[in-house]
């Protein structure tokens, strides 16, 4: 039955636990008396919310049944409040609630103050062998201050809800679920929120994190997330990461800083597994990265550039006439370098930038005549008509410092004619980079599936439309882009002319510089493949489709050898390549291109993280690997140093070409793309065309998940039990295919 214990008068206080106080004004429920309560009550209620008294807990106090402590105020600082058996713990007061630690393993804890503040120690409803219990803290008119909040579970984590009228200050928030679902976290005051970190990860699905404040949010500490990132907020899940939403009161005046929690921001990354906002980045306006949203006010609209045609016309300018060309260095302080505008000087500028980041030197700089010769050799060998497109900004004033008003310029190098320079009127550094950032954000937001179209079309007008007449006149069908800093993480394949994507006209790729690229053509159709990967990791998301990916590649599509999990070690990779000079190396594993020095970026092997400054130790350059594929890598979008690592992958690895992704799209999406890519590679004369045909197949719906099977060109692949649980998936959106970029030689 139910047990109700109330004071004799509204002014009488209650002491729970300890020994008898000896006061007639206090209702004593001593520890001895509490121990006489038999286990089995449906509920126990102690006190009265209409009372003017206080409930004080003296020493450690344990309840075995659902208990509610209710009074005008509650004070429990002298011990620990413990729940056992089937207890739930509820504290309800009109005024302040002050407690020490509260522990109730796997069962709910709720604390509500109607008119006062809440101040607690650690609140722990975690469970080492079951689900975590829910935690709810609500202060209708006051502030909430707590120690750690822990609702983690061996299976599912419990939800954590903290709502306050003014501000919230907590320490570590952990709602993770080890083998199941992470609990969701909701924080909602009008004033500031400060936490150490939030871990809502799940063994299967991460929990939702939803934060709303009219002021500022700060996450001041870090932990190592399941995907290996140092994070302040993580909702990583093996199958799906939870959505993260942070609404703050910066109002376009105070930015939200990822990497700086001094005023408004996080000390480290925000990650949901598939999507990560890495430090250091600052967001003055609303920002979306996949299922991560930082909400303030929308950015002001980008002023459209003047139409390219008919006024003013773009006049090709012979490159013999010199002008000043500036290239940014990789540090935050962008330092310009003035050079003549021959192709050789532009090549030298880009090459030196990569040399500095990659730790190499003395690269011979390709002359214009050599560049033309290489393009002619490719055209004669395989019938492809390629061009090089250099993209950079030049100043409009005499200033030696790069300016937001610097103009976008393009240089087109073909096998036949003189190079042509295009000045794009109205396309300033500020406009272009703002549009690039908007494009990257929009294309990873598949919830608003058409948001990428306006920036995709604007960028096409700036980067491709000025060249289109010359490209068509010469029958060009392969475009190699050599791009300036801040443009190298641009998903080029999704550029759109308003009717068609660029890949519906041309094959494309990204090159650090021609001087750094081995362009000698070797047919790849009969090359053997070394395929290695891992499905399970100790500190990162699992990749359950990797075994199927490897068995499909080697068992059905290509000749070679494969190694999985424990066999995927540095020594085995090095030994296998030394034993047989495989021309294709496919690594199905996590890879991260991170801000900072090259050693911050890595490829995850079974036994270690292979830092990119160590990758040459594998000997891929002798003899050169024709194609290195990283099927599950991602890049810190918009970071100059991460872009240098990604665009320089082929150089740092010593391979002719590399295929990687700007963001991680999903395990099954990667399997779909890779299975089709290798089918296309058997039929295509160049690697860039194989990637183009795969992207077109996905765009047209020819590659899809349907009825527990993967349909990929001529293959129908039966999914694993894990993938059979997934719903049918349409992979036509460019989010699924435009992240994959061919780096180095397209041929």
Image (tube, rainbow, N blue to C red):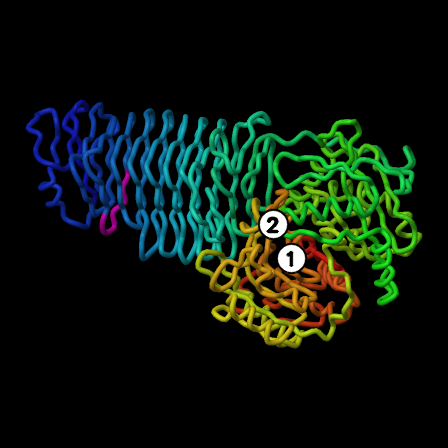
The total of numbered circles placed on residues is 2
10 Å crowding of disc 1: few (<14), some (14-19), many (20+): many
Q: Quadrant of residue 451?
A: top right
Residue placed at 57% from the left, 70% from the top?
548
Assign a secondary structure to mark 2.
strand
| Residue 106 on the magenta segment | no
Residue identifier under label 2: 635
Note whether residue 728 is visible: no
Most extreme residue toward the front is: 362
Residue placed at 90% from the left, 56% from the top?
475
Most extreme residue toward the left is: 22
In the picture, measured across the screen, residue 253 lies left or right of residue 85, that is right
- Please name whichever residue, 440 or 187, is drawn nearer the observer in this view of the structure: 440
Q: Quadrant of residue 675?
A: bottom right
Q: Are marks 1 and 2 in contact (CB under 8 Å)?
A: yes
Give the mark, 1 or 2, whose residue is nearer the N terminus: 2
Residue identifier under label 1: 660
Q: Quadrant of residue 284?
A: top right
| Residue 88 on the magenta segment | yes
Residue 477, x across and y down, in percent: 84, 57
Residue 222, x across and y down, in percent: 43, 42
10 Å crowding of disc 2: few (<14), some (14-19), many (20+): many
Assign a secondary structure to mark 1.
strand
- Please name whichever residue, 299 or 661, is drawn nearer the observer in this view of the structure: 661
Q: Relative to 29, is 383 above or below?
A: below
In the picture, measured across the screen, residue 120 lies left or right of residue 198, that is left
Q: Which range is magenta?
A: 84-90
């Amino acid at each position: 039955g139910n047990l109700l214990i109330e004071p004799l008068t509204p002014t009488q206080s209650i002491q729970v636990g300890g020994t008898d106080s000896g006061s007639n004004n206090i209702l004593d429920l001593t520890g001895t008396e509490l121990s006489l309560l038999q286990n089995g009550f449906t509920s126990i209620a102690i006190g009265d919310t209409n009372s003017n008294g206080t409930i004080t807990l003296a020493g450690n106090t344990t309840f075995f049944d659902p208990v509610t402590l209710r009074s005008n105020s509650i004070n429990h600082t002298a011990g620990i409040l413990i729940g056992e058996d089937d207890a739930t713990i509820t504290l309800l007061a009109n005024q302040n609630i002050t407690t020490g630690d509260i522990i109730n393993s796997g069962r709910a804890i709720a604390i509500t103050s109607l008119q006062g503040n809440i101040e607690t120690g650690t609140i722990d409803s975690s469970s080492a062998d079951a689900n975590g219990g829910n935690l709810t803290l609500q202060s209708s008119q006051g502030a909430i201050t707590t120690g750690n909040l822990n609702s983690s579970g061996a299976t599912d984590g419990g939800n954590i809800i903290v709502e306050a009228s003014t501000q919230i200050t907590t320490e570590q928030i952990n709602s993770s679920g080890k083998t199941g679902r992470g609990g969701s976290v909701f924080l909602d005051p009008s004033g500031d929120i400060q936490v150490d970190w939030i871990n809502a990860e799940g063994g299967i699905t991460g929990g939702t994190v939803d934060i709303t404040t009219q002021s500022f949010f700060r996450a001041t500490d870090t932990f190592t997330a399941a995907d290996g990132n140092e994070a302040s907020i993580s909702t990583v899940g093996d199958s799906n990461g939870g959505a993260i939403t942070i609404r703050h009161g910066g109002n376009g005046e105070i930015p939200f800083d990822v990497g700086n929690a001094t005023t408004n921001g996080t000390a480290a990354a925000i990650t949901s597994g598939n999507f990560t906002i890495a430090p250091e980045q600052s967001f003055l306006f609303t920002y979306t990265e996949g299922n991560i949203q930082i909400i303030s006010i929308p950015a002001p609209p980008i002023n459209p550039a003047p139409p390219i045609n008919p006024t003013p016309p773009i006049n090709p300018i012979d490159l013999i006439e010199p002008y000043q060309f500036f290239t940014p260095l990789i540090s935050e302080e962008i330092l310009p370098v003035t050079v003549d505008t021959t192709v050789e000087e532009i090549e030298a500028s880009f090459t030196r930038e990569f040399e500095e980041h990659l730790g190499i030197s003395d690269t011979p700089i390709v002359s214009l005549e050599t560049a033309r010769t290489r393009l002619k050799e490719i055209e004669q060998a395989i019938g492809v008509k390629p061009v090089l497109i250099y993209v950079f900004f030049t100043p409009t004033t005499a200033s030696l410092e790069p300016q937001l008003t610097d103009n976008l310029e393009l240089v087109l190098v073909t096998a036949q004619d003189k190079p042509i320079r295009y000045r794009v009127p109205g396309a300033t550094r500020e406009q272009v980079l703002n549009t690039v950032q908007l494009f990257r954000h929009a294309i990873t937001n598949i919830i608003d599936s058409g948001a990428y179209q306006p920036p995709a079309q604007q960028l096409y007008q700036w980067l491709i439309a000025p060249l289109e007449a010359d490209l068509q006149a010469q029958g060009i069908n392969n475009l190699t882009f050599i791009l300036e800093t801040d443009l190298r993480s641009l998903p080029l394949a999704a550029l759109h002319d308003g009717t068609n994507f660029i890949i519906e006209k041309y094959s494309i790729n990204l090159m650090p510089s021609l001087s750094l690229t081995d362009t000698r053509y070797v047919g790849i159709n009969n090359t053997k493949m070394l395929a290695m990967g891992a499905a399970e990791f100790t500190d990162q998301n699992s990749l359950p489709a990797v075994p199927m990916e490897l068995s499909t590649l080697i068992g059905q599509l290509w000749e070679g050898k494969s190694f999985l999990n424990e066999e995927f070690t540095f020594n085995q990779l090095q030994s296998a390549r030394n034993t047989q000079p495989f021309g294709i190396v496919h690594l199905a594993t996590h890879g991260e291109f991170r801000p900072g020095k090259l050693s911050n970026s890595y490829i995850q092997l079974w036994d270690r993280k292979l830092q990119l400054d160590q990758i040459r130790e594998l000997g891929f350059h002798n003899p050169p690997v024709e194609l290195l594929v990283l099927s599950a890598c991602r890049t810190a979008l918009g970071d100059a140093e991460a872009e240098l690592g990604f665009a320089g992958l082929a150089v740092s690895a010593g391979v002719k070409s590399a295929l990687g992704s700007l963001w991680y799209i999903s395990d099954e999406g990667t399997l779909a793309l890779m299975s089709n890519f290798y089918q296309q590679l058997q039929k295509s004369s160049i690697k860039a065309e194989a990637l183009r045909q795969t992207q077109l197949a996905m765009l047209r719906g020819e590659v899809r998940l349907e009825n527990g099977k993967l349909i990929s060109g001529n293959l129908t692949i039966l999914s694993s039990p894990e993938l059979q649980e997934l719903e049918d998936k349409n992979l036509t959106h460019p989010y699924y295919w435009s992240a994959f970029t061919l780096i180095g030689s397209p041929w």
